[in-house]
Amino acid sequence: MRAAFALICILAAGSGLAAELDRTPLEAATVDGQKVRLFPNGRWEFVDVAKAAEANKLAAEYPENKTRPIEAQGGLFGGVGRTIMPGDKDYNRGSLNPKVR
């Protein structure tokens, strides 16, 4: 019983310490000397604004970065189903059940 209580106390103290981690990005340089900013979640970006804009433009062309817009409706997990964009005749049409109209 004491071991379980001690374990609970250690886990509770550990979660309190984890909330105070430093989340500021780090400045770093690539092998070829380009300055980048490293984020704690694994993402990185160029420090130079022009290079960052060019990289974002290139990344937008990859299919895995072409996601469903926020204002679109429908579509299930992994792109299964139809995604309805704003302006489509079926956008925000509601239920077609006559009992609930």
Image (cartoon, helix red, strand yellow):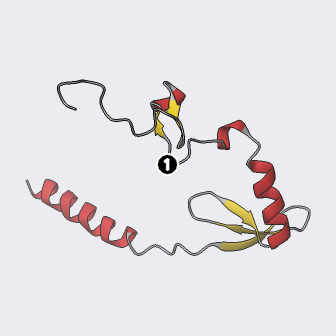
* Residue 32: quarter of image: bottom right
Q: Quadrant of the C terminus?
A: top left
Residue hosting label 1:
71
Q: Nearer the viewer, residue 82 or 101?
A: 101
Q: Secondary structure at mark 1?
A: loop
**Residue 68, horizontal then vertical, whole percent:** 56, 41
Residue 37 vertical position relative to residue 57 in the rendered view, above or below: below
Amino acid type of the residue that numbered disc 1 sits on in the rendered structure: Glu
The residue located at (48%, 24%) in the rendering is 81
Q: Which residue is situated farthest in the left direction here?
A: 1
Q: Position of residue 87 (x, y in %)?
A: 54, 42
Depicted 39 relative to depicted 80: above or below: below
Q: Quadrant of residue 97?
A: top left
Q: Badge 1, how many Cα within 10 Å: few under 14, some, many 20+? A: few
Near-viewer residue (66 or 45): 66
Residue at image x 57%, y 75%? 24
Left or right: where 49 falls relative to 22: right
**Front residue of this view, candidates 100 and 35:** 100
Say which of 70 and 84 sits in front.
84
Horizontal and vertical percent position of residue 7: 21, 57
Q: Residue at x 31, y 71 (%)?
A: 16
- Residue at 51 percent across and 75 percent down: it is 22
Seen as rendered, the residue at the extreme right is: 32
